[in-house]
Amino acid sequence: MPYEHLRVIRDEPVNRRKKPRFPGFPKPADTRQHGRALQASLARVVAATEEPEPGFDERRLLRINVVEGFRPEDLEAIPGLTVVSQEGRDVALLFSSEAALALVDQRLSTLARDGTVTRGDLLLAIRGFDSWRAEDRMGTALVQLGLSEPHESIVDVELWPLDSSRERVAMLVAFEAFLTLQRMPILDRLNQPSLLMFKLRVSAQQLTALLNYRDVRLVDLPAQFGFGIDVFQVDVNELPAVQPVPEGAPGICVLDTGLAAAHPLLGPAVGDTANFVERGEATVDTDGHGTRVAGLALYGSITECMRDGFQPTLRLFAGKVFGNDGRDQTRFVEKAVDEAVRYFHETYRCKVFCLAYGDRNKIYDGRHIRGLAYTLDRLSRDLDVLFVVPTGNLLDHDLPDDALEDYPGYLMQAAYRLLDPATAVNAITVGGLAEFEQDHDAQRYPERLETSPLARRNQPSPFTRVGPSIAGAIKPEFVAYGGNMAHHHLRRRRTTQRLGVISTSSRFAEGRLFDDAPGTSFAAPQVANLAATVLRYLPHASANTIRAVLGAHSRMPGEADTLLGENDAAKLALCGYGRIDSRHLFESADGAVTLLGEDAIATDHHHFYELLLPDDFWHGRRRTREVSVALAYCPDVKTTRIGYRAVKLSFNMVEADNLEQVTGWFNSNRVEAARKLQEASTRVTVTATARSKGTLQCATWTFKASGTRRLFIVVTRKDEIWYLHPEVPEPYALAVTFRDLENLEANLYVQVRQRVQQREQARIRARG
């Protein structure tokens, strides 16, 4: 019997987090020698850059290599040093005046002579000085591919997004004057709080000038979006009856190549379409990708609907933000996405957006988050919306010749990392799973053994890209069906025919209502469909709550678990938290109960929750029981700090005798002891260290032995030093599910509901 999900209730008190004492950075064995080495390093940099690079003022851009964990803001204690960015865990970039360089040199002389100096802790944490060179400003695609045309190519130029509004304006004025002098046409501009970009047309000679301009952070090739690998058409002769969309149905918005809105399976659900490419075009989908994505976003699984009938329960919206023909290179897709999201959110209150493509020219290299991902992170927080994006695809020529034998090992290569915007920490990223194993030839000639699938059903798609994102954040969070590949032994080539995902076709007027295509682009809308469907049951849910409830119902597919064995890093990089189980996603049942809660936590505080599990959950014969916890939040972000997230929330689940024991552990900084007590005593799917690196954190604990336990969840917040608003409570959502997997007579829901009601009544009485 289905029931509405219950509330999870926070316990009192709310306690401040006791900060651990900082042990300090390791000191060099010989401080005098360290001072001499640093002084020589600084002298080499100054000598090599006697003529400072052009910029909006006279300061030098100085690269300072520091010990890992050092806060670059501390260097601003030296007058004349201004932090520009942190480009790695041990690299800080600063603007430095000549007076500041002289002061640093003077202090290094003192350190070299005496072994001590004023603010010597700063100098001892520095490993060396260097300059920021032209090669440091080259993006991955530019390094690998070079300019497409030596005399006239389009490039994306990222400037340092300075915090000072006065300096930012001065930098923009100076840079545009530089472009005019160099005769580089400006095609588009993008100005966001932590992202400042220009799209330019340049020659090889002009590119050299750009790469030696001090205020340029990065130059790279423009977006090249990857939509799929191959397409196979499926004929359908009879049109299933389409039921009308229910009144008040939540919306789902697809941002893609447009939409064939007259498709007989999509048309009845379409609310609005709009074009944001600015070419005077209609919103029609000439590519076909947007229509395929829309069918999956609306229905979830076309193959199931072909069997059970088409019943749209969502209202479909579509924004054309990319034309997929190369002509839109003159405009930033970030701007089109920003405009589209604001339009559909403000006009129709859309909360779930599917952006099903990835930029092949922006493979994540472990450095800062790039333009589109940052745009999604910022919009997610500003508007309380949820984006669902794919990991991106490998093309056939990316795969090794021995892919059949080397699968899935080859997927873990650094070159196969995520594509922008899959790195966005506040969005949901989806990887691919194989659904079908027989390709076109294997189905036509079943007696022959000419082809072999690279992956088996529910194993990672052979072309799915891998995480993690910045600072090790788990990406993708989820997986869904994205397609498969097969190796043809006689022809010595790979094929995807009849191994992709079936969806609606833009060529329906030719009699083809459906087509088939492989790619993680078609995995993402399946998850977006589930996210939007949550709003049918929880119409006022925040984006955090949607993410949390999806996470609490995710499980690693058994086939993928077996394939990857004990390689936990590969499991997280390929599958994240797994595939979403929709059986009890929207409503609880007698033996599967979900509790949801939202709150906001102050900096350096703990929140405590006791899980009100009934005795029946623990007692009885030895059997498998699961408790899953998911935490979701949407922090402010900054591209110029390695600590990209302004706020870091985390949770631990611990077993204790009472609430006082739990608060004692966390208030006396014995968190590790409490964490090990719970995570060592049962099988946990994702450790606290691994999950805490992302903004969606999920874990499942498995219990088999009988015996009553008291379980508590502890949510903790700490902030980055650069965050300007630590006084603002950070909102978060919590979802907890527990399931009795082997007791068919379980009747947990009524007992839990009764306990929740008793706790609420007791709290009301206590408040008097």
Image (cartoon, rainbow, N blue to C red):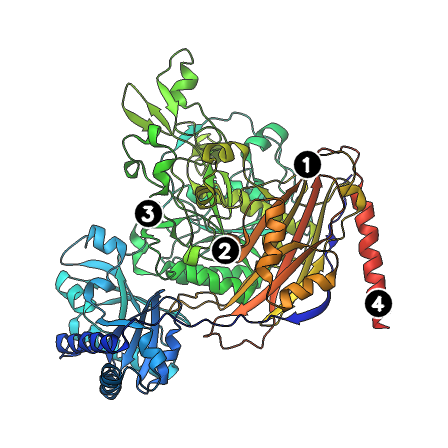
Q: Which residue does the numbered mark 4 point to in the structure image?
A: 764
Which numbered disc, 1 or 4, marks the residue that appears first in the sequence? 1
Observer-nearest residue: 195 or 297? 195
Cα distance in 3D space between marks 1 and 3: 38 Å
Comes first in the chain, label 1 or label 2: 2
Residue for point 54% across, 50% down: 687
Question: Gap in Å between the C-alphas at discs 4 and 2?
Answer: 37 Å
User: 724 or 446, which lies in front?
Assistant: 724
Up-down relation of residue 605 to residue 302 (above or below): below
Where is residue 269, by image quadrant?
top right
Three-letter residue code for mark 2? Ala
Of the two numbered discs 1 and 3 in the rendering, the one whose residue sits closer to the viewer = 1
Question: Which residue in the structure is indicated by mark 1?
Answer: 624
- Nearer-N-terminus badge (1/3): 3
Q: Is residue 163 above or below residue 453?
A: below
| Residue 629 spot, x, y in % from top left | 63, 51
Q: Disc number at residue 427?
A: 2
Q: Do the CB atoms of the residues marked 4 and 3 lie less than 8 Å apart?
A: no
- From the top left corner, tell me how far across and down residue 42 is, in percent: 20, 77
Q: Amino acid at mark 4?
A: Ile
Q: Are marks 4 and 2 in contact (CB under 8 Å)?
A: no
